[in-house]
Image (spheres, coloured by chain):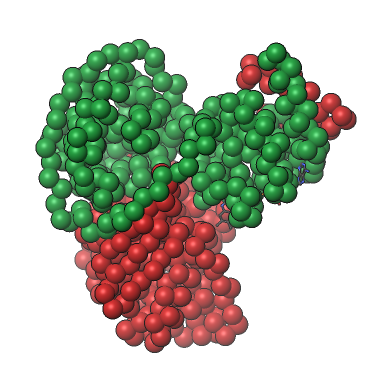
Amino acid sequence: MSEVFILAQFVGEKIAKTTAELATCGAGIGNVTAIVLAPPGSGSALASQITFGSISKVIVIESADFAHFGVAASAQAIAHVVNEHKPSALLITSSAFGKEVAGCVAILTNSGLITDAVDVSSDLVATQVIFGGSSTVHSRVTHGCAIITLRPNSFSPDAAVGSPEIITANITISDSAKLAEVVSSQPPLAEGRPELTEAQIIVSGGRGTNGDFSAVETFADLLGAAVGASRAATDAGWYPHSHQVGQTGKTVSPQLYVACGISGAIQHRAGMQTSKTVVVINKDPDAPIFELADFGVVGDLFAVLPQASEGVKARKS
Amino acid sequence: MKIAVCVKQVPDSWAEKKMMGGVLDRQGVDAVLNDLDEYAIEEALRIVEAHGGNGEAGANSVTVISMGPERTADAVRKALSMGADAAIIVTDPALAGSDALATSKVLAKVIEEGNFDLVFCGTESTDARMSVVPAMIAQRLTWAQLTFAGSVVVDAATKTATITRVTEAGIDTMKAQFPAVISVVEKINEPRYPSFKGIMAAKKKPVEIKNLASLGIEPSLVGTAGAWSVVDDATPRPPKAAGIKIVDDGNGGKALVDFLVEKKLI
Ligand SMILES: Cc1cc2nc3c(=O)[nH]c(=O)nc-3n(C[C@H](O)[C@H](O)[C@H](O)COP(=O)(O)OP(=O)(O)OC[C@H]3O[C@@H](n4cnc5c(N)ncnc54)[C@H](O)[C@@H]3O)c2cc1C
Ligand SMILES: Nc1ncnc2c1ncn2[C@@H]1O[C@H](COP(=O)(O)O)[C@@H](O)[C@H]1O
């Protein structure tokens, strides 16, 4: 059976849902080992959260350098493990950090790289959806370890539990990976809503909100959804940049994407085009976003959204 | 301060892109300068100008580097019109079909020969959308990697660069000694439009053309031949079936909820 390594991801001290997604994807390929990069002293607390039935082994590497030197130090440690164990694949979540780490590990291990896959078959053929959702591509890595980054929300995590074997690896990060230092870090503000890339439902607002996101937020909270925004809305300062969906924001593929007062510029679509179901509220019947809509309402979001919120509330009571 | 900016020519975002034999069809579409690279050019120009930029090959200058087919010269011309001092284009038939590993290898080789303090990149090319080339260049050169910068401050005296790294993981302040590779996000500045004077001046700026032989890179290591991943097939996705579209008659919100219930989304 082939060996598959995954990079476990944590949000603060808590395991990220994307780790379970990687594990589920990996289990369809072979025997799964999770790599945990931890600050000194936190290795066992982090590793103990890996209780997925699909993972057989956890390799814990502790070092203060991961937080201090980011991508370069993380890539060096992972490359060390990959060069030693020679797994047939390494799966990492697609994010700014994940993709950069994947790229550096590819160089350090002489391996091919595929980014933003939405599926990986048992024989390591990756599926990507490219050009803003207009084409599906199947590709394979032909040299070294198949390093593949997987888009969040592409897999429904398998619920089976297990207790993987935990081993510790001692790796010293060399000075060549300590050239750029993280002087300070400010994690994104927690707002009690789901993380955008992990959310099953996203309600997004654009210029059409005119700066008033309350209707968008109310509807989002009733659905347990995350709140997204177009660049017009983040540029205007109406919503934080960390909520921007699109080419220069986040790429999301939730079960349901509700676009309110967003015209559907190509850069916005690039970030949400793979959403399973798209619902649109826009007062302009010719807005290009309607091309993507499974259900579209031509109307004023300030009338349609509150009525929809009432409708959801009525169903709940 | 000698700065290089890596820029890529990409198919126009609005053009319909097609795959041909496993690679992007670059002939059949309009090509433009990757718009995210304009922010990198702008940032480099501002830094050099603040240090009394003194033109081609001067101690404070901006050199644009691009790898691509011959017509990449058009994208490079735009960068020169904005104010860059010189350009290096790497073009070679054997480069067609290069993956990010090969691209970073070629760009790193050019950079190595140039004695630069800083290299600026965009965060992403709008066609490949990998966001890996800047980190890979840094990895290959063993240079500091300052990527996803929302702001850049350089101190020429101490030869240090400080950035704020803006990603989904939050905001980090990062600091490094030269030489460093810096990629910039689109919030960092507002790129200038080339002025008429700039466009005229660009015509006289030096553009050096290199190929694999002049860089001493074995053709079998790059392009389709050297790629470490292959595309098995690429198929256009069936256009999305037309959805339901209603005009709000006072019950639009209710109809929306009915749709979500019917689809079992709530
Ligand atoms: C390099 C670059 C990168 C970019 N990256 C991104 C990105 O990552 N994400 C992104 O989103 N954009 C991005 N953009 C910007 C993008 O091109 C658009 O400008 C932006 O998406 C427009 O946002 P919008 O749809 O909210 O605004 P607009 O295009 O102004 O559309 C507003 C819409 O709201 C509708 N409307 C107005 N009032 C109401 C109402 N009361 N009820 C219902 N509907 C109403 C209007 O009919 C209109 O369709 C980028 C651009 C560039 C150049
Ligand atoms: N062929 C190329 N020539 C020059 N620069 C490039 C090339 N490909 C990528 N880059 C640089 O790397 C950045 C990220 O590209 P990518 O990793 O392809 O998304 C771009 O914004 C450019 O600055």
**On the image, which quarter does residue B190 sit in?**
bottom right
Is B72 drawn above or below residue B11 in the view shown?
Answer: below
Is A99 drawn above or below residue A175 in the view shown?
Answer: above
In the image, what residue occupies the spot 46% across and 86% down? B204
Where residue B86 appears, x then y in whole percent?
Answer: 40, 79
Where residue B138 appears, x then y in whole percent?
Answer: 28, 58
Looking at the image, can residue A111 be seen?
A: yes
In the image, what residue occupies the spot 39% across and 14% down? A159
Left or right: residue A64 compared with residue A243: left
Choose between A50 and B185: the one closer to the eye. Answer: A50
Is B246 drawn above or below residue B52 in the view shown?
Answer: above
In the image, what residue occupies the spot 36% across and 45% down? A97
Left or right: residue A79 compared with residue A214: left
Left or right: residue B172 compared with residue A48: right
**On the image, which quarter does residue B22 sit in?**
top left
Report the residue that reaches farthest toward the right: B249
In the image, what residue occupies the spot 60% across and 51% down? A234
Looking at the image, can residue B72 be seen?
A: no
Chain letter, red? B
Where residue A306 appears, x then y in whole percent?
Answer: 76, 31
Q: Classify the position of the C terminus of chain A by image quarter.
A: top right
Where residue A87 appears, x then y in whole percent?
Answer: 20, 30
Task: Determine the colour of chain A.
Answer: green
